[in-house]
Amino acid sequence: MAATAIRGVTARLMRGNGSTARLSLARTAQLVIDHPADPAETVSAPEEDADRSERVELTDWGKAQRLVPPVEITNAPMEWDFPARRLGSGVPRWLHY
């Protein structure tokens, strides 16, 4: 699904045309279930200091650093208004833009 979204954005940026896709979350889930990861394989490299943001947040579990995003988009920083917290601890409210 993410790859299809990226292809659509790329087509829009390169050729100026839009795109459509018919995707199934259930089918994607079935593909993941049918092809489990091999626990013997290393999925990713060990975490290093450069993988973490310099900013330290005070979360419900103590001090923490977020991982840096894998990609960056000019003038669109990936950031959060609040530090990480326990599920259900936020007050629900409508956002008005």
Image (tube, rainbow, N blue to C red):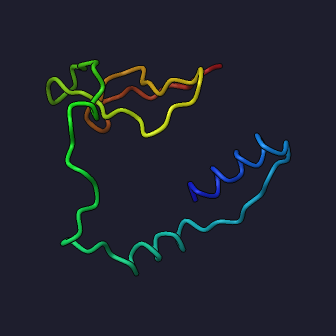
Point out residue 86 in the picture as x, y percentages from the top left corner.
25, 35
The quadrant where residue 33 appears: bottom left
Rendered-image quadrant of the N terminus = bottom right
Observer-nearest residue: 8 or 44?
44
Which residue does the image show at 42% across and 72% down from the upper left? 32
In the rendered image, residue 58, in percent from the top left (x then y), is placed at: 21, 19
89 lies above or below 12: above
User: Would you identify the image quadrant in which residue 90 lies?
Assistant: top left
**Residue at 27% across, 31% down:** 50
Quadrant for the C terminus in the image: top right
Q: Is residue 41 above or below residue 64?
A: below
Residue 59 location (% of width, % of height): 22, 25
Name the residue located 71 percent from the left edge and 51 percent from the top edge.
8
The reply, left or right, for residue 56 in relation to residue 94 is left
Q: What x and y, as percent, mark residue 61? A: 15, 30
Say how many tags the image has: 0
Residue 19 vs 83, above or below: the answer is: below
Is residue 3 placed above or below 31 in the rendered structure?
above
Q: Quadrant of residue 47?
A: top left
Comparing 57 with 14, the one in front is 14
